[in-house]
Amino acid sequence: MAFRIRNLDLEAGQAFQACEEAYQKHLESFEEHSHSNLWKYFATDFFHHGAIRSICFSPCLKSLVMQIECPNIKRTIKDHFDYISMDFICEFRGVRTFTLQNENPDLVDTIYADSSQFVGSEINTAIPQKINPEKIHSLTIEALEGNRRIWIDLLFSNMSVSPEEPTAYSILESDSRFHIPTYTPSE
C-alpha cells in the first residue's frame, strides 16, 4: 500500500513539490461542501509527528475510533515560539473497508498501530471508480513505529474530529497567539 499522489519519501525539491501541487489540485477538485473535518484535519497533515495513541475498530458498528496527538499547534510569545500538543478523537462511521498493512512483516507483533507516529495522509484517492465520491470518502494514513511503516486505509461515509479538551481547544482557536495548522481551501 502507498499514497497514490503524494510521495513523502522524496527529498524536498522539484519532484516533491510536483507531488504536493498535484495533491492540492486533487483536493480542490471536490465541491466546497466536502471540505469537512476530513479536509480540515487531514489535508495538511495536522497530526504530523503526532502519536497514534489507539485505534479501535468495531465491525458490528462499522466504525473506527482513533486517538491521535497533534503536536503542531504553534504558540507565539513576543518574538519566540514553541509548539504545544493536544489529543483528538477521530471517529469514522459507515466504514466499508479498513485495511492495516505493515511493510515489514518480520517485525509484526500484536499491537500494530499503538504508539506509532503519524507521518501523513491522503484523502479520496482510494475510492473505487464504481462508488460515488460524494457519498463515500477514503483516507490513507502512513505511520511509523520503529523500523516499520504501517499503512491504514479506510473507506467510510462520514467522520468527526473532536479535541479531548474542547474548552481548551476553543480558547486556542480564539487566541491570536496560537496558530492551528488546519486546511483552508485556497481562494
Image: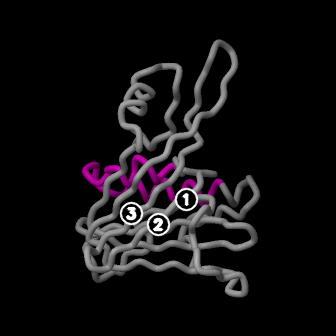
Magenta stretch: give its range. Answer: 17-44
Residue 19, percent from left and from top: 60, 60
Q: What residue appears at the point 41 percent right and 72 percent down from the top-left corner? A: 154
Q: Quadrant of residue 134?
A: bottom left
Amino acid type, mark 1 = Ile
Tag 3 secondary structure = strand
Q: What residue appears at the point 45 percent right and 20 percent down from the top-left corner? A: 175
Which disc number belongs to residue 52? 1
The type of colouring in the image is: one colour
Apparent side of residue 95 relative to residue 183 in the rendered image (left or right): left
Q: Quadrant of residue 169?
A: top left
Q: Which residue is mark 2?
A: 55
Looking at the image, do the residues carrying marks 2 and 3 touch, with CB atoms under 8 Å apart? Answer: yes
Q: Which residue is mark 3?
A: 65
Looking at the image, do the residues carrying marks 1 and 2 touch, with CB atoms under 8 Å apart? Answer: yes
Looking at the image, do the residues carrying marks 3 and 1 touch, with CB atoms under 8 Å apart? Answer: no
Q: Which is nearer the N-term, disc 3 or disc 1?
A: 1
Tag 1 secondary structure = strand
